[in-house]
Image: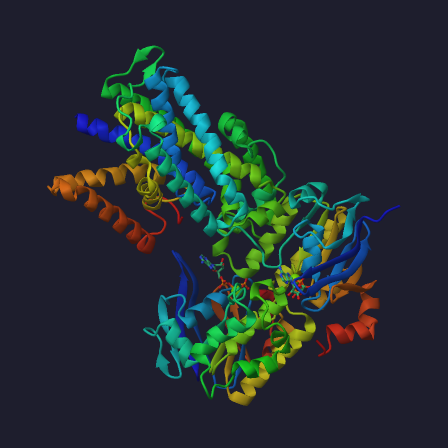
Amino acid sequence: MILELEGLAAGYGAKTVISDLSFAVAEGEILALLGHNGAGKTTTLKTAMGLIAPRAGLVRFAGVPLARVPVAERVARGLRLLPEGRGIFPDLTVAENIDVVAARLAAGGAMFTPEALYRLLPVLAERRTTRAGSMSGGQQQMLAFALAILGTPRCLLLDEPSIGLAPNLVERLFAQVRDVCRAHGVAVVLVEQNVAAALALADRVAIMNSGKLVFDGTPEAARASNLWEHF
Amino acid sequence: MSAYLEIAGVNHSFGGLQALNDCGFAIAEGGIACLVGPNGAGKTTIFNVITGFLRPDTGHVAFRGRPLDGLTPQAIVRAGIARSFQNLRLFADLTACDNVMLALPERAGETPFGALFRPFATARADRRRRGDALQLLDHVGLAARAADRVRNLSYGEQKLLTIARLLATGAELLLLDEPASGLASGALDQVMALLRRLRGEGKTLLVVEHNTRVVQQIADEVLFLHQGHLLAQGSPAQIIADPALAEIYFGGAL
Amino acid sequence: MDYLYSYLILAEIYVLLGLSTNLLVGVVGIFSVSQAAVFGVGAYIVGDCLLSGTLSFLPALALAAVACVLLNVLISLPSLRVSGDYFVVTSFGIQLLATATFTNWTWGTGGANGMPGVPPPDLFGASIESTRGILALTTMAMTLGCLAFWLILRAPFGRKLRAIREDELAVAAAGKGVLGAKVSAAAMAGAFAGVAGGLYATYLSFIDPSSFDLDASILLLTMVVVGGARTLWGSILGPFLLLALPQALTLLAIPTTYAATSRQLLYGGLLIAFALFRPQGLLGERL
Ligand SMILES: Nc1ncnc2c1ncn2[C@@H]1O[C@H](COP(=O)(O)OP(=O)(O)OP(=O)(O)O)[C@@H](O)[C@H]1O
Ligand SMILES: Nc1ncnc2c1ncn2[C@@H]1O[C@H](COP(=O)(O)OP(=O)(O)OP(=O)(O)O)[C@@H](O)[C@H]1O
Ligand SMILES: [Mg+2]
Ligand SMILES: [Mg+2]
C-alpha cells in the first residue's frame, strides 16, 4: 500500500468534518472516492496532502508516517494533488507554469518531462505562450492536470479532474489516468461526481457520507449496493 | 417579429486568436437552450459579449428587439439578462445569505443616504430581503448554510449558491455557465428540476453544459458552437444524431 | 488629569481617522496611503479660517469637510481605473505631493515652521477653552462618526462595499453599480478626515507638516491592522491602543532623544507582528 489513511479525523475551527476515516490505495490501483456535496472528499485529500492538520489518526506514505513531513517534501516524494478549482499560476504563460513546476520536480529521468506532457496534451503545446489565466475553463483544467502529474508521481490525488472538460477530453483524460496508473504503477485517488465514468475507470470504490466512509469495495459491488441514496 | 435574444455577426479576437468568428444565433422566449461545444469554442466569450463584459470587435446583440451594444453589465442586468460565472466569482468573505441578498434588485438603503438617514426603514426592508434570500437558498438546498461564509462551503455547495445568486437578480433571461459540473446526483436532480420550474414560470435559460445527460434532460434546443462559430442549432436529438458534430464533441479530434 | 484628557482627545480624533481609513482601505479595498494628507488639508483649512477670522469654528469645519470630501474623491479616482497594486503607488505620490505642499506653501500653511496660534473651537459664539469642553466636543464628533460607520456597515450599502472589495465584476454582474458606491465611500472617508483635521488644529493650536506626513498615514494603516479591518470596535480599539503605547514607553523612562525612534520601532514591529501572526487584528477581519 502506497498511501494509507488510518482513523483520520479533520475539520475546520470547531467543526469536525471527517472522522474515523480509514482506507488505503496500492501501487497501480485506482480508487474512486465518491460522496455527496459536502461529504468531506476534498477535506480528506487535503488532509492526506498535509494542507490540513489531522485531529486524530495518521497518514502513511510508502510505509512512512507523514505527521511531521511538510507539504513540499510530500510532493517531492511523489504524493501529488490536483486541487479543486484549478491549481495554476494564472499570470504565467503555459510554458512558464510547466517550467516552474518542472524545475523542482522533473529532473532528468522523470516519468513525465515537459516534452512528454506536451506530447500527451497537444492543447498545451499549441498554447505554450498563452497566459494561463486567459485560457478557457477547460483548457485551464488540462493545465492543472499536467502540473499534477509532472515529474515522477507515485500517488495522485485528483479532486474532480473532469470539471469543465468537454466529453471528448474527459474520455482522453481518464484514458491517460489509466495509462499513467497501469504503465507506471502510480496509485490514484479519484474524487469525481461523474460517477459512471469513475466507476468504469476504478479498481475500487470508496463512498463517503457526511464525513464517514460507508463503503469500500469493488465497482460491481458498489453498483449493486443501495448506497446511491447517499448522494 | 424580432427574436427574443438575437446575436448577429459577432467577431472577437484576443491578440491573434479569433475566439468568436461571425457568431450568430437567436433564441426564443420561454425555453431552455443549451450551448455546447468543445473547450475553447467561445461559449464563455459569447456570454461575456451578451452581458456587456466584453465589447466585441464587430457584431450586435439585441434583446426583445432592443440593441444592447455599448450597455454596461449593470444596465444589461436591469434590462433583464443576468449570468453566472464558470469560475463562480462568489464573495468568499461574505455569508451565503449576503451573497444572495447583494444580487436582489436595488431598493432603498443601498445608497449611503438611506443607510444614514432612514436607518429603521432600511433595516426593515433588509429583513424582508433576507426572507427573500433565504427562500432562494432553500430552492437550491442551502438554507442550513445561510449564515456560513462562502469560503467555508464545499465546491458543490458554492456551485449551488451561484445559482441562487443568479436567481436573486430577478432577470428574465438567465445565462448559466456550467451549472451542473461538480454537483452530486441528488443536487443535480434538484437543480434540473429547478431549471425546469423556472422555465415554467416564464423564464428563458441559456445554459452552457458539458454533461450530455443534463443537456438531453433539460434542453428544448441545443446550439453547437465550434471555433467561435455556430455550427448547428436544433433539438437535442437532431444534434446528437449528427455524426459530424459527434466527431467534434465526442471524438478524439481536437 | 490633563494628561489623561489630552490622551482621550487625541485618541478620539484618531478614531475618526481610523474610521476614515478603515472605510476606504478595509471595507472598500481602496488601498490609500495618503489619508494623513487629507487630514492635513482639513486641519489647515480650519486653522486658516479661524486665524484669519473669516469663518467661525462650525462653518470652518463644514468647509474643511466639504473640501476633504472633494479631495478624497479626487484622489480615489485613479483607484477606479488602475488595479489595487498600482493605486498604492499613485496614493504614495499624492502623499509626497501633499507633504511638499504643506512644507513649502508658506503663505497657506506656515511651511515647515508650522501654523501657531490656532484659536480654540467656538460654538455659537462661545469659545471652548477648557480641555473638558474640547473632550466633550471630540467625544460627540467621534460618537457621530461611529454611528455613521456602524449604520453604513450594517446596511445593504455596506454589504455592497464589502462585495466590491472582493470582486467588482461580480458586483456588476449582480446588476449593481460600482462607481457610485466607491465614490460615496471615498466621500464619507474624506468628511471624517476633514472633521478630524479641524478638531486636531483647534485642540493643539499648533500644527505642522510632520503630523500629516507619510509616517502619519502609515500610523493610520497600522491602527486598522492592529484594531482589525471592517469592524467598528476594531476602528476604536486601534487608535486608543496605539496612542497609549508610546505613553507606556515614557513610563519606561527612555531618554527623550530615543523616544521618537523607539515609537517608530514599536509601530513597525507591531505592524509586522500583526501581519504575520494575527492578520485579522484584535477585533476585526483580515485587511
Ligand atoms: N474552510 C472551511 N471551513 C469550514 N467548513 C468547511 C471548510 N471547507 C469545507 N467545509 C465544510 O466541510 C464539509 C466538507 O467539505 P469538503 O469540501 O470536504 O466536501 P466535498 O466532499 O469535497 O464536497 P464537494 O463535492 O461539494 O466538493 C462541508 O460541509 C463544507 O461546508
Ligand atoms: N481574456 C482572454 N484573453 C485571451 N484569450 C482569451 C481570453 N478569454 C478567452 N480567450 C480565448 O478564447 C477562446 C474561447 O474561450 P472561452 O472561454 O470562450 O471558451 P469556452 O467555450 O467557454 O471553453 P470551456 O468549455 O473550456 O469553458 C479560448 O481559446 C481562450 O483561450
Ligand atoms: Mg470537494
Ligand atoms: Mg467556458
- Colour setup of the view: rainbow
Q: Quadrant of residue A75?
A: bottom left
- In the image, C37 versus B103, the foreground residue is C37
Residue that extends furthest to the top in the rendered view of this protein: C125
Q: Position of residue B54 (x, y in %)?
A: 67, 53
Above or below: residue B124 compared with residue A71: above
Q: Which residue occupies 52% across, 60% down?
A: B154
Q: Which residue occupies 35% across, 76% down?
A: A66
**Quarter occupied by the N terminus of chain C:** top left
Above or below: residue B120 compared with residue A42: above
Asked whether residue C38 is in view, the answer is: yes
Asked whether residue A215 is in view, the answer is: no
Q: Quadrant of residue C143?
A: top left
Q: Quadrant of residue A95?
A: bottom right
Q: Position of residue A55 (x, y in %)?
A: 36, 66
Above or below: residue A161 compared with residue C234: below
- In the image, B201 versus A228, the foreground residue is B201
Q: Position of residue C88 (x, y in %)?
A: 43, 48
Above or below: residue B17 compared with residue C76: below
- In the image, C11 versus C232, the foreground residue is C11
Q: Position of residue B52 (x, y in %)?
A: 68, 49
Q: Which residue occupies 50% across, 82% down?
A: A187
- In the image, B200 versus A99, the foreground residue is A99
